[in-house]
Amino acid sequence: MTDLRPGSEIADGVHWLKDSYVNMYLVEHDQDLILIDTGINKKAKKVFKYIREELESRKISNILLTHHHLDHTRGLHTLHEEFHSRIFVSKEDSDVVTGARKPPLPNNIFMKPLFYVVKGIIRVKPVKQIEIASDNEKIVDFSVHHLPGHTLGSLGFLKSNALFSGDAAVTTKKGVVQLGPKIMAESMSQSFASLKKLAELKFDILLPGHGTPILSDASDRVIDATLNFDKH
Ligand SMILES: [Zn+2]
């Protein structure tokens, strides 16, 4: 019986962690773990605690980043120091992660001043030791899908019947699939095109960057989302 709450194994070998409002996933792989996104806590406290208490202090061998936003990457530096994991990110988003480029500001004029303040308080330590993940590439047992829009280098990772979508597709509590928030999107038209690209894949489980995972018929929910947009 699957128990759908953060801080538990929600599908075979897939553990859902939630850091404030953002999701992370630990996936068992042989004796190691693969982490999808690293959360907003710079010490990655929830990840360390969960691995210690539930996963016999196993090692994170690979970290896959769905995109460069700080709520998905802020724990990266600490985790990399501990595990020396291989880190994969898209080419387009990589320079933000390594600190070579400043993250783009939100596209809403009212949010810009607030974001400057937030950036001053919330610092993200760059990590240079990254590797590039490209569209259609296979990393461990995940296939990489480039889903630009939310950021230009947003990635989804598909592992058998489970898709880790980052913010290219997020969900509501009731399991409705949506695009990531408009104010943070680098291109809404590309976001929508990427959602349509996702709708062509077949998967049962959707593990979004925000919201509640969907554990069955998830690709049908993505198709529903594209149809809703088409109506508007
Ligand atoms: Zn994001």
Image (cartoon, rainbow, N blue to C red):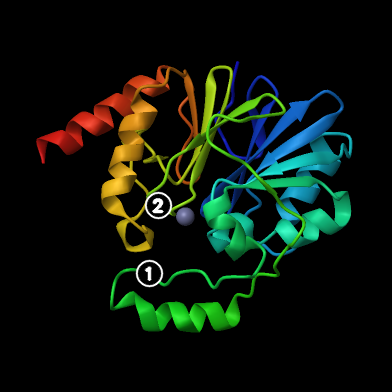
Marks 1 and 2 sit apart, C-alpha to C-alpha, by 11 Å
* Image quarter in which the C terminus is found: top left
Dot 1 alpha-carbon crowd within 10 angstroms: few under 14, some 14 to 19, many 20 or more:
some
**Residue beneath the point at 38% across and 61% down:** 184
Q: On screen, 125 above or below 23?
A: below
Position of residue 37 in the picture relative to residue 148 (left or right): right
Q: Nearer the viewer, residue 6 or 202?
A: 202
Question: Under 8 Å from ligand 1: the CB of mark 2?
Answer: yes
Q: Nearer the viewer, residue 53 or 163?
A: 163
- The amino acid type, in three-letter code, at marker 1 is Pro
**Residue 19, image x, y percentages:** 60, 53
Position of residue 7 in the picture relative to residue 62 (left or right): left
**Residue 32, image x, y percentages:** 84, 32
Q: On screen, 171 above or below 39?
A: above
Instruction: Write down the quadrant of residue 111 in the picture.
Output: bottom left
Q: Secondary structure at mark 1?
A: loop
Q: Is residue 20 visible?
A: no
**Residue beneath the point at 28% across and 77% down:** 109
Q: Is residue 198 visible?
A: yes
**Residue beneath the point at 73% across and 62% down:** 127
- The amino acid type, in three-letter code, at marker 2 is His
Question: Under 8 Å from ligand 1: the CB of mark 1?
Answer: no
Residue at mark 2: 150
Dot 2 alpha-carbon crowd within 10 angstroms: few under 14, some 14 to 19, many 20 or more:
many
Q: On screen, 168 above or below 217?
A: below
Residue at mark 1: 106
Is the residue under label 2 in contact with that under label 1 (CB below 8 Å)? no
